[in-house]
Amino acid sequence: MASTPEYAKFLGNRLRDIRIQQGLSLQGVEDKSGGKWKAVVIGSYERGDRAITVARLSELATFYRVPVAELLPDGAPLPIEPGSKLTLDLAALYDHSSPDLAHVARYARGIQQRRGDYNGRILSIRADDLTALAIIYDTTPSDLIEKLSDLGVLIADPAKFFAEQDAE
């Protein structure tokens, strides 16, 4: 897939978006890198006219201070609507033995304290909370969602969750 025009276009767009987000022109990249990254080369990568090796992509990601995965199609985060919410199973979260969930549990407790919400069963977190957690875990929001789901602490359907809880 790495050689397809669609891939090159996606990668180039991601590189351009990140450069622009950082307030850099093509010449600005060359200047900031001390000439390591030539403006013409970066422009060629961004247009998809020139192939980039994995090693060079990694170096460029380091220069931009972003994870390489953010530049790749499979690393593109799923769009999460600003008003959307995710629901955590608090019992599963707080009882889970995985140290990978320590930050999520601490964050959830903080949200509960701020909201004064101690129902003890579920907690809805907003897209902004998810983004903050993803930063803490140095991952994308979509990868964090997948991880939380795999670890059994994410509730896909809260109504179904409560129906199952009440049936027990």
Image: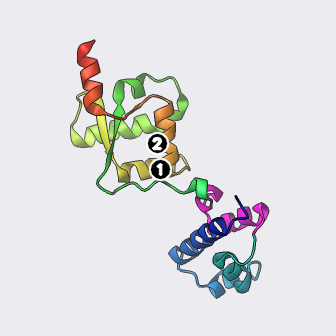
What's the residue type where badge 2 is placed? Ile
Percent of width and height locating residue 22 = 54, 75
- In-front residue for pair 5/13: 5
Q: Quadrant of residue 32?
A: bottom right
Q: Which residue is mark 1?
A: 141
Label 2 secondary element: helix
The CA span between labels 1 and 2 is 6 Å
Image quadrant where one finds the N terminus: bottom right
> Badge 2: how crowded within 10 Å, few (<14), some, or many (20+)?
some
- In-front residue for pair 115/24: 24
Span shown in magenta: 52-72
Q: Which residue is mark 2?
A: 145
Left or right, 129 with reference to 136: left
Q: Are the residues tagged 1 and 2 within 8 Å (C-beta)?
A: yes
Image quadrant where one finds the C terminus: top left
In the image, residue 151 above or below residue 7: above
Q: Residue at x 41, y 48 (%)?
A: 130
Percent of width and height locating residue 27 = 65, 87
- In-front residue for pair 68/79: 79
- In-front residue for pair 118/76: 76
